[in-house]
């Protein structure tokens, strides 16, 4: 079982597992609900993606500083509960006959707001439960959850949406967030409040910026995520509508395509750690960035019949490379950053990634209206490939993971070994 021998890590893993599956439902259900039930245009559907990621642009950096001041598990539980309530409001409104695009935009915006705090707190919380040397293994386990959800989730989501309708299907996602909150509440490792310090928001954010700017691997990871995220969001804003309208595929077929294509994510979750041991973490990051960009070139070639294989192949290769990028990118970020600054460093990388996605989503929707959806997919693919250039300095690097510290444990784990209790 490896790192899952620890009961608290198993609880964190269990919380993440079902939540990842639930999140696959809203990825499919929300754009389909807007495009079919509510009759939204392609541009209006792209606004939903914009609303989801806009909070990172507005409060992402501040949230990193705030998370460095707070108990992280409480933030995670509150964010899960808030997202469950928001999602539950959609089927309730649909049953009452009052659901409209404005409410859906508000729900998606609120989901994004809670997601900012959850993502930053989660990436900061993991090193408090897991010894430093086991972080790649723990991150690989968590990314395997994402991989399994990526493989089975789209098909399951397609069946649920087709059987229940998009609005009712979101109730299942709400339940998944409640599941996550309940498992997080069972973790017994003390959720210690960070040490008190002078609270000057701009100064705190600046300290995190200097950490990223002063480390070439962290800087490359952050820059690649920012550039690729911009063009990836343009792709994501229209691809579901492209499959549904241009190719005439049903929700179940779209979900099945996702299941077939995203088996690469499961493969990566099982093999990423071994790949890092063989190549070194930095070179694994560089290779994954190049593969990610090349694979994106297959998406615009998708068509009816046998041409659907292009979508499956692109999905397999991109999902494989994304998991490799996340496993080693997160592990390096968590080990290279001083613990008291980790929330801010996580916030900087996440804010740059998600902060550019509203503009990317709007670009995707606008270009689709002018050039057509297939041409827009070509533009997005070219941009993702160009992003790999910033990872070029890592091609000759060996592993850049910092050396393990004496004791190889986090403060929270050390406290638990001494018998402390919450």
Image (cartoon, helix red, strand yellow):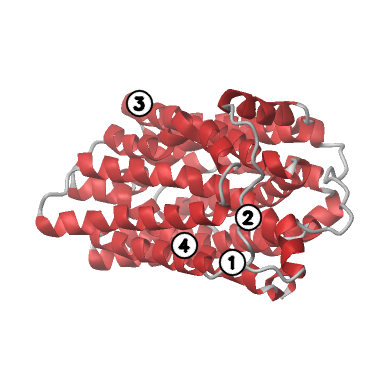
Residue 399: quadrant of the picture: top right
Image quadrant containing the N terminus: bottom right
Q: Say whether disc 1 or disc 3 marks the residue closer to the N-terminus.
A: 1
Please indicate whether residue 114 sits to the left or right of residue 39 in the image: right
Give whichever of discs 4 and 2 has the lower sequence position. Answer: 4
Disc 4 vs disc 2: Cβ atoms closer than 8 Å? no
Report the residue marked by disc 3: 366
Give the residue drawn at x 56%, y 41%.
296
Alpha-carbon span between mark 4 and mark 2: 25 Å
Residue 69, x across and y down, in percent: 58, 42
Separation of residues labelled 2 and 1 (CA atoms)? 20 Å
Near mark 1 (Cα within 10 A), the count class, few <14, some 14-19 or many ≥20, is many
Q: Secondary structure at mark 3?
A: helix
> Disc 3 or 4, which lies upstream in sequence?
4
Residue designated by label 1 = 13
Closest to the observer: 156 or 209? 209
Q: Which residue is mark 4?
A: 19
Disc 3: CA contacts within 10 A as few (<14), some (14-19) or many (>=20): some
Residue 364 visible in the shown view: yes
Which x, y percent locates residue 348?
Answer: 60, 33
Measured along the vertical axis of the image, is residue 211 above or below residue 40? above
Circles 3 and 4: CB atoms closer than 8 Å: no
Foreground mark, 3 or 4, reads: 4
């Amino acid at each position: 079982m490896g790192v899952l021998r620890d009961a608290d890590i198993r609880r964190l893993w269990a919380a993440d597992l079902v939540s990842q599956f639930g999140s696959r439902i809203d990825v499919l259900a929300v754009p389909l609900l807007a495009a079919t039930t509510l009759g939204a245009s392609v541009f209006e559907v792209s606004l939903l993606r914009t609303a989801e990621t806009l909070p990172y642009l507005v409060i992402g950096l501040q949230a990193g500083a705030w998370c460095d001041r707070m108990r992280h598990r409480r933030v995670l539980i509150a964010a899960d509960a808030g997202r469950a309530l928001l999602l539950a409001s959609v089927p309730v409104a649909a049953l009452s006959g009052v659901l409209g695009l404005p409410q859906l935009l508000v729900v998606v915006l609120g989901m994004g707001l809670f997601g900012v705090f959850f993502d930053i707190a989660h990436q900061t919380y993991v090193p408090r439960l897991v010894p430093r040397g086991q972080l790649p293994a723990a991150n690989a386990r968590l990314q395997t959850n994402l991989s399994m959800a990526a493989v089975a989730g789209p098909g399951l989501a397609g069946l649920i949406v087709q059987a229940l309708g998009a609005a009712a299907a979101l109730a299942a996602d709400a339940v998944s967030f409640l599941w996550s909150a309940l498992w997080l509440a069972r973790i017994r490792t003390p959720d210690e409040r960070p040490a008190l310090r002078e609270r000057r928001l701009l100064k705190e954010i600046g300290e995190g910026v200097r950490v990223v700017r002063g480390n070439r691997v962290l800087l490359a990871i952050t820059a690649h995520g920012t550039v690729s995220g911009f063009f990836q969001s343009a792709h994501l804003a229209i691809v579901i509508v492209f499959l549904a309208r241009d190719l005439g595929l049903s929700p179940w077929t779209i979900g099945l395509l996702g299941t077939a294509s995203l088996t690469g994510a499961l493969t990566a979750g099982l093999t990423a750690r071994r790949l890092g041991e063989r190549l070194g973490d930095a070179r694994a990051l560089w290779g994954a960035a190049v593969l990610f960009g090349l694979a994106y070139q297959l998406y615009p070639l998708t068509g009816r019949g046998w041409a659907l294989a292009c979508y499956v192949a692109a999905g397999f290769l991109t999902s494989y490379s994304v998991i490799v990028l996340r496993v080693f990118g997160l592990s390096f970020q968590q080990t290279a950053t001083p613990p008291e600054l980790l929330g801010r460093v996580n916030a900087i990388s996440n804010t740059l990634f998600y902060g550019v996605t509203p503009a990317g989503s709007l670009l995707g929707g606008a270009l689709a209206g002018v050039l057509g959806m297939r041409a827009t997919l070509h533009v997005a693919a070219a941009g993702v490939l160009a992003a790999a250039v910033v990872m070029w300095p890592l091609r000759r690097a060996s592993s850049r993971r910092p050396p393990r510290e004496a004791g190889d444990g986090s403060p929270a784990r050390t406290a638990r070994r001494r018998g402390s209790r919450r």
